[in-house]
Image: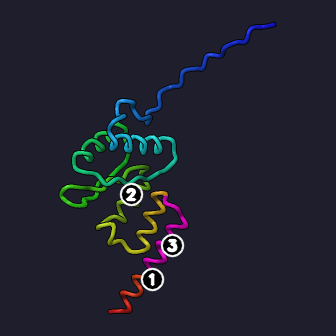
Amino acid sequence: MAEPVALIAAAEAPQPFAPPCAVEGDAFLRLLHHHVYEYGRGVRALFLMTLTRTELTRALDRMAKLGIDHFVQEVCPAKANLFFGRRAFVDVARSLATRSLNLLTPEEDFMLGALLGYDREQQCLRYLARRQRVALATAAE
């Protein structure tokens, strides 16, 4: 009877977007690297993170090192929104996020949610609810 042959798995080339093991204890970095990993694998094309100034600095360093398109939207002196992903998605998000996100029109909110990969049915329900609120507010004037 022949001996079973052990197959040696070929070492995989390191993935440029794979999260480094060194960030195990830092929740912000784990989330950032998870998003970067999803971006690199093509799971999603646009991401949004609301970050403190310290986190933002670290995230921007990572975006620069990896060459990922991004832009920053100021939220308040202590926080900012970081949008990042594929260039066309980031460009559209930049054109939509010209003011606070809670001030977007129902159509802008819907489009941004769709670009971020949110559930389509929930986006439709959110859009309809926001449209109705706008209609009621307009009628009350």
Q: Which label number is shown at residue 132?
A: 1
Q: Amino acid at mark 2?
A: Asp
Q: Which label number is shown at residue 125?
A: 3
Left or right? Give the position of 9 relative to 52.
Answer: right
Q: Residue at the location (24% across, 55% down)?
A: 79
> Whole-percent x and y of residue 32?
37, 44
Majority secondary structure of magenta residues = helix
* Residue tagged 2: 91
Circles 3 and 1 in contact, beta carbons < 8 Å:
no
Which type of secondary structure does the marked residue at label 1 adopt? helix
Q: Residue at the location (45% across, 63% down)?
A: 113
Q: Residue at the location (35% across, 30% down)?
A: 22
Rounded to the nearest angstrom, the CA distance separating label 2 from label 1 is 29 Å
Q: Amino acid at mark 1?
A: Gln
User: In the image, which residues are magenta?
Assistant: 118-132
Name the quarter where the N terminus is drawn: top right
Task: Categorize mark 2 by other alpha carbons within 10 Å: few (<14), some (14-19), many (20+).
Answer: some
Which type of secondary structure does the marked residue at label 3 adopt? helix
Task: Categorize mark 3 by other alpha carbons within 10 Å: few (<14), some (14-19), many (20+).
Answer: few
**130 falls in the magenta region:** yes
